[in-house]
Image (cartoon, rainbow, N blue to C red):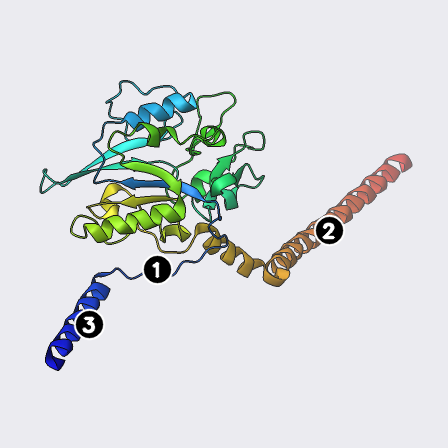
Amino acid sequence: MERRSFLKGLLGASTAAVATAAAPARAEVKRHRELASDAVGMLYDSTKCIGCKACVVACREANGLQPEGTLHDKQTELNCNTKNVIKLYKDEQDPSVFAFMKQQCMHCIDPGCVSACMIGAFHKGQGGLVAWDGDKCVGCRYCQVACPFQVPKFEWDKNNPKIVKCELCKDRLAKGGVPACTEVCPAKAVIYGKVEDLKAEAHRRIAAKPSLYQPKVYGEEEAGGTQVLYLSAVPFEKLGLPKLDGTSVPYRSESVQHGVYQGMITPVVLYAGLAGVVFRNWRAGRGADDEGGDLVDAASARVEQQAKKEDRR
């Protein structure tokens, strides 16, 4: 009996050790903002997606965007007419291995676009979603540079251009609805809900079919965490999702800025250097003016002497 208990305990410990070893190391999450208590988002399961693009069509209709050719065109990138796109990954060595990828705004918990927007046109709205206010936008496009997922797009062909990106159908949510893409998906590859509930569902699926999924939920840590989460059978990098650590863009960029400007030492040094250059140039210019004045005085004296000689004659 004691031997059986010992073996059972040893087996349990070994299983736990294997499970711990198999689990991916969690990244240290660094961000200025925390997940809102009412935060909502989406969970996209690449293994369920059939690539029908019903979500792409529904997104355009819900947001009044112009279609890009036919339904099954080769549009694979976000642009000013596309807030949501389905991409296809194929293994070059084994064509039978493929996966679909849904790209849209990730609605970061601590967004780089919000931090970079000088006027506050980008902001965190209800449900923690990243929204855009056209009345405040000055068209600087810093948001495009700051986004690690390359989501915001600019209307280059418009006289009054806008920044275009997924806002998770905020008008539909305000009326008690759900995002258009989640409503029409026939395979329920993308679902909408509270972020904490979506995380729990994602981990439940991984635990139920560990051989099917990558052993992590993308977006739980990346860039400080996002409110759009991903499950996949292939490595996330192959789907086009960037490999990021747990540090948000604002945490990294603002830490550098605060270090540079701490105590105003750097601006003081820069202004002192600039003042030194201005003073040096001023002295050099004054010296040239003094020298030029002496030359003018000497020339005038010679002219007067020559005039007096002419008078004596």
Please state the horizontal and vertical placement of residue 9, each as a whole percent of the image.
17, 74
The secondary element bearing badge 3 is classed as helix
Name the residue located 34 percent from the left edge and 60 percent from the top edge: 27
Q: Which mark is residue 286?
A: 2
Q: Which residue lies under the disc numbered 3?
A: 13
Q: Are marks 1 and 3 in contact (CB under 8 Å)?
A: no
Please state the horizontal and vertical placement of residue 165, each as a whole percent of the image: 42, 32
When the figure is inspected, residue 18 is found, relative to residue 224, above or below; the finding is below
Asked whether, in this view, residue 233 is left or right of residue 173, the answer is left
Task: Tell me if label 2 and label 3 are in contact, CB under 8 Å.
Answer: no
Q: Which mark is residue 73?
A: none
* Distance between mark 1 and mark 3 Cα atoms: 25 Å
Q: Say which residue label 1 marks.
A: 27
Residue 71, quarter of the rendered image:
top left
Q: Earlier in the sequence, mark 1 or mark 3?
A: 3
- Residue 114 % position (x, y): 50, 43
Q: Is residue 106 visible?
A: no
